[in-house]
Image (spheres, grey):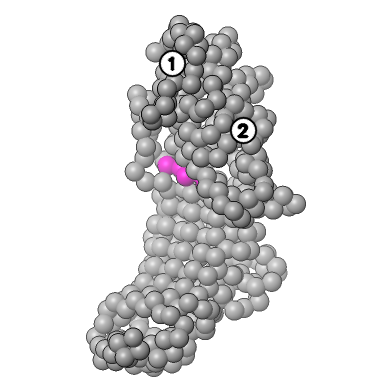
Amino acid sequence: MEEVLRGVDSAIGAVITRNKYLAMDVAMEYLEPTLISCSDPAPILEYLRLCPEILIEVSSRLFGGQIPQSLRTLELDYFKIPWTSPLLNNLVSLSMTSCDDGNTVGIGPLLQMLRRCPQLEELCLSRSFIGGDSPIIPAEPTHGVSLPNLKSIIIDCPEDDRVAWIINHIDFPLSASIHVGINIDTDGPPLLQSFNADGHPVKRKISTMKHLRMDSTDSASQFILCLEGASIHYSPTSFVRPDEWTLELEVSARSLQSLGVVLREFSSLSPFPMMEALEINCPASLDSAETAEWVSFLQHFPRLTALWVRGGRNDTLLEALSFLGAEATCPLLRKLRYRCSDITPTLVHIFNVRTSASCQLSRLVLDFECGSESPMPEEDLREIEAVPFLG
């Protein structure tokens, strides 16, 4: 194996001066000789990917200290690199995963680096440490960075309180896709509320969303709930999925925390004034959230007309749909697609309550689990069939 790798390193050194594309995922024991093979200049290199298995500093010997002026796409995993590095100049695409900027002087250097990449189209800072232990807000006023060509921004870093600040100091088109990832703690205030500032890119994005999908994953140590949104013109005649999701908000919590804790985090966001369709896909029990928590969440969608529910036990979610007080839950809801679980849903109650409040459903689709018989008694099915739908 070592002999093969020596041959690879030799081949890299021989062609690096005329390479445009270089990607290296290197095991720790072979890292040093591989980096040595990249000690010659690479004058026409356009794409560079470096992924060692351990956190290391970018060597000053890389490319003989002559950073390729042609470099436009850079992907780094497990690197310690300062924002002042000449590698981070004039990029079109930058992706940094599990990296460390190695400074303790705040977030300012990140913005200064972005100013050196005015043509940037893609920015990904995933699980990377930004600014060390310095305060989130610099002592001096900070001017934003204009990135008029940005198409995608992904930021999820351990210092969760910095995510909203960073995004708010980048001026980019409303059409760009935004991915935000945070980790929540029940002892602190909701982190997502920091995105509610007037003019914040996430708040502006929320105001354009028309279709939203909610998915959850659960492991031994972590519970993750993700909202994905799309600015599309929703079809009123069918349950249509968008081809592209341009807003993604991902919240991670300790596995012992309930779904209700994460729902309360999302409920700290501004309302979604244009939302028309919502998909809820949670394999775990939706009943782990209280009815009041579902009500608070669903009240963020005053124009919702279509709801698709797939998950485990969900009586509390269904009960929230019958909450029609002074602040009604989804008063414009007309279409419900519902995957029945092993618990008989209280759909008849919902129909009766919403009908009496002039919020009647006009379309119902029941998805029974494949291979199972209807869990609903025949008399309940007959009662649902007797509901005078409007459509």
For residue 287, which numbered disc appears in the image? 2
Q: Nearer the viewer, residue 137 or 348?
A: 348
Extent of the magenta region = 226-230
- Tell me how many marks there are: 2
**Residue at 62%, 28% in the rendered image:** 316
Q: Is residue 229 magenta?
A: yes
Residue 82, x across and y down, in percent: 54, 79
| SS class, disc 1 | loop
| Image depth: mark 1 or mark 2 in front | 2
Q: Residue 71 vs residue 357: left or right?
A: left
Residue 37, x across and y down, in percent: 35, 91
Separation of residues labelled 1 and 2 (CA atoms): 26 Å
> In which quadrant is the N terminus drawn?
bottom left
Q: Residue 376 vs residue 119: left or right?
A: right
Residue 129, x across and y down, in percent: 59, 70
Q: Can you name the residue that lies furthest to the right here?
A: 187
Q: Which residue is mark 1?
A: 362
Q: Quadrant of residue 353?
A: top right
